[in-house]
Amino acid sequence: MADLTIEALRERLDAAGHRPRDFIAIVPGPREQVGLAWDGGSAVVSKPLAAVVSSIEQLEPRWVWWNARDIAPAAIDARVRPETCWDLGAVGMLTEGTRRDDAASSWAATHGLELPTPREESLDLFDIDQRDDGPLRDGQLSPEWLAGGWRDSPDRIRRWAELALELATKQRAAISVLPDPRAATPGVPLRTLIAYSESAAALLCVELEYDGLPFDLGVAGALLRELIGDRPADAAEEEAQLAEREREVLRQFPGDPRYDLRSPEQVRELLGTIGLNLPDTRSWRLKPHRSLPAVAALLTWRKADRLATTYGWRWLDANVGADQRLRGRWYAADGGAGRMTAGVGLHNMPAELRPAVRAEPGHVLVRADLGQIEPRVLATVSGDEAFAAATRDPDMYAPVAARLGCDRPTAKVAVLAAMYGQTSGPAGEALRAMDREYATAMAFLRQAEESAREGVSFRTYGGRLIRFSAPAEHENRAVTAARGRYGRNAAIQGAAAELFKAWAATVRHGLKSIDGHIVLCLHDELVIQASVARLEAARDVLRDSLAATTRWWAAGNGVRFVADIGSGESWAGAH
């Protein structure tokens, strides 16, 4: 089949009756060849990928791709930000409970086939000697095609796009028959909407990697010098600095102690030399005793040691570019409940370094944090009307405390303990009261725990499959209990992650009109950069996006979601 011009392609799409948000599969081939497939046709266009995306984006398609990383970087390079997509890898992980987003896994899982191992996906002599033009072998994607063989000719490129469209159609059909947990809600099913937002989150991850987090090297350097000392000249000097910081702590203890400060047992012994006999050496356990110089020095050392070994000078050199942007790999869903995660410490950056995360000149950082997100999600997914009523208060723990007959801190501990599977402790009486006052929510949590204990897989509110295998014969009771707690928490954290990503996708769309960008997604917190002149508009986008998202995500149950919004020149200043 001859290559098409973009103009001819658009004519074909018009003739096929293309409408906004219809699927168009796209794959980038070599030599500026781009394969496309749509309902009723397919073609190869000999133009740069970004030019094809830019032109067809005007038709408002829902792009289908095997993985956003195959497409998005080239488009972003050309200042094209695709609006909507269907990411086959992200949707496969969502609906099939896989932990991989590659083409082979997505295809196999959606077709009910055994997931291929890396060995089965690799080429061997049989593949080379018995090569044919077919993309499938025993129903699985051919190792030869997976290894790049689909790029060998225009016909193969076109066929690869057709397979992507076929898989997307099959995935959407499978999702459409899943029950909608919302009662009698018209419009697009919830779980299809979640597939859209999971796909958007995968695209957002590529954008976050490409754009990076604005990071002031001068401020970061000053902070590190204050916290851990001057930049070492070499590895030997770095080791000497680490050793000297340890000696400064040990000098606060009697005698000439030789202890490893990274060993909890040895630190317990060390603390015993000043009369502190503690069950463990966790920081929260030590803080009440920080009036003692030795304990204060130990706590200060711990903070500095973490910075020096994880976020020190080498970390700065390796991850912050000359453009003063901190970049790391982003993942749209972890291997468990589906939370967004990131590498190079982006998700665990200590508060001491947050002043270095600074907006570019003329811009401001705006932070929005979803308040009490997990209990509000529990009210939604469980359908507990009494618990939903508590969410209508900006601080939902206050009405919960009144209902349980306890103070607010105890009520908060009881709610969190229920979601994390704790059944005793200081909030034991309040937990028992929760069984009485919020029976539906507690029954929901127990059902998730029991399913996990018995090895029964289940779906989150948004449709993510949480897989469990059958328990081993004579399984240790502690292992069974831990699996139960994980199931209880995954049912809530998984749903909360889906809500967060749906909100982030809506914010991403809303920011386009004010030339703003998301620069960080941190658990339940979004950080965006916008011009100073558009600060109030950015705040409105965050608030309005949350309202728009929860209208369909939590339709019909009366649960209220809130966000705390702040702004400043730096991330620290936006709190």
Image (tube, rainbow, N blue to C red):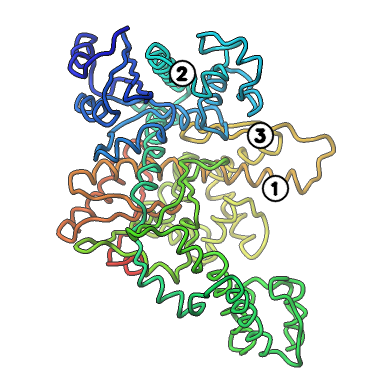
- Mark 3: amino acid: Phe
Closer to the chain start, of discs 1 and 2, is 2
x, y percentage for residue 504? 35, 45
Q: Circle 3 sits in a helix, a strand or a loop, which is it?
A: loop
Query: What's the residue at 60%, 74% (across, down)?
Result: 302
x, y percentage for residue 309? 57, 67
Residue 569: tell me if it is visible.
yes
Left or right: 306, with 535 as reference point: right
Closer to the chain start, of discs 2 and 3, is 2
Whether pointer 3 and pointer 1 mark residues with C-beta atoms closer than 8 Å, the reply is no
Residue holding disc 2: 150
Q: In 3D space, how far apart are the residues under numbered discs 3 and 1 (Cα atoms)?
A: 13 Å
- Mark 1: amino acid: Ala
The picture quadrant where one finds residue 287 is bottom right
Q: In 3D space, how far apart are the residues under numbered discs 2 and 3 (Cα atoms)?
A: 35 Å
Query: What's the residue at 46%, 44% (across, down)?
Result: 497
x, y percentage for residue 536? 18, 57
- Mark 2: amino acid: Trp
Query: What's the residue at 25%, 26% (across, down)?
Result: 52
Closer to the chain start, of discs 3 and 1, is 3
Quadrant in the picture for the C terminus: bottom left
Badge 1: few (under 14), some or many (20 or more) residues near its Cα, within 10 Å?
Answer: some
Residue holding disc 3: 468
Residue holding disc 1: 482
Left or right: 560, with 95 as reference point: left
Query: What's the residue at 60%, 44% (across, down)?
Result: 488
**For the residues carrying marks 2 and 3, which lies nearer the camera in this image?**
2
Front one among 198 and 115:
115
x, y percentage for residue 157? 40, 17
Front one among 100 and 219:
219
Residue 186: tell me if it is visible.
no
